[in-house]
Image: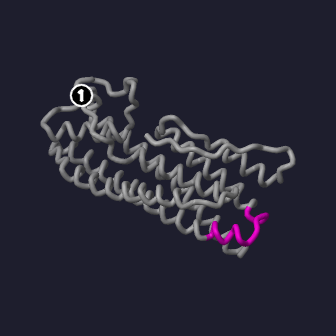
Amino acid sequence: MASFHVRSVSLPTNSHPLTLAVEQQLCQLKSTEQATSSSICKNLSGLKDLYDCVDDFISTQDGKCLDTILDGSIMLLDVCSIIKDVLSQMKQSVQQLQSSIRRRSSEVSEYMISRKKITKVIRKCLSDLKNKKSDETEVSKLTEVEATTLSVFESLLTFISEPKQNKSLISKLIHTKKVSHKSDEEISEVMEVDFAVKAHTKGIEVNNVQKTLRALEMTLQDLEDGLEIVFRCLIKNRVSLLNIN
């Protein structure tokens, strides 16, 4: 899983109160060694708190800085919208697969096709994010907010992307009755379903597939809910920038 890194921030006692509030929120969005659904949801909630502070903070910034951020605000909305669509498509595919298994038809080919299409979108979006991050030169508090937002988005996309082939993990999922065990490599809800479905296509029965699918559906719903709140914050932030300009 990808982790994201936020530039260390000092908190001098003479900082403007609004600057201090933004810095404190940035500090709370610290990098994690391994992204999990709960940590990503927490980071999405952290972004909401961050943008609540940013709404007041932007009134203290000069026009040149705001012009740069205004351009970036459209990009953030576009990326957020793409991720929302990806999560919605994934959840729909999971629900369809659950329905198929309940009917005992176990038609997983449609899920696999949908997964591959979604993976292509995710990989392109991740590539675009990396290019965007490499283009960043000017550093200000607001550009740091933008970079942090992109890093959270990157972490989410990496979490839901199709994992690389890992025979040892597939073997554990096939031969272990419970997939909730701890191993030296954490198995996310997304990975559990991907490996279970791939094993299913080879004629191997995997225990608790429905339970795994339900867990993934709940995870996707939590991520959707968190991302929707962030999306609204980004819209509000852009409106504030336009009003100031």
Which segment is the magenta one?
Answer: 58-70
Q: Is residue 165 above or below residue 168?
A: below
Q: Report the residue at 48% width, 61% height from top.
A: 79
Q: Residues within 10 Å of mark 1 (few under 14, many from 20)?
A: few
* Residue 188 counted in the magenta span: no
Q: Position of residue 97 (x, y in %)?
A: 25, 47
Q: Report the residue at 69% width, 58% height from top.
A: 140
Q: Quick check: 84 left or right of 44?
A: left
Between 12 and 197, the residue placed more toward the observer is: 12
Between 79 and 114, the residue placed more toward the observer is: 79
The residue wearing badge 1 is 171
Q: Position of residue 157 (x, y in %)?
A: 43, 50
Q: Report the residue at 63% width, 66% height from top.
A: 69
Q: Quick check: 27 left or right of 100?
A: right
Res 42 quadrant in image: top right
In terms of secondary structure, what is the magenta stretch mainly? helix
Colour scheme of the picture? one colour
Q: Report the residue at 33% width, 42% height from top.
A: 163
Count numbered badges in the picture: 1
Quadrant for the C terminus in the image:
bottom right
Type of the residue with mark 1: Ser
Quadrant for the N terminus in the image:
top left
Q: Secondary structure at mark 1?
A: helix
Q: Position of residue 49 (x, y in %)?
A: 66, 50
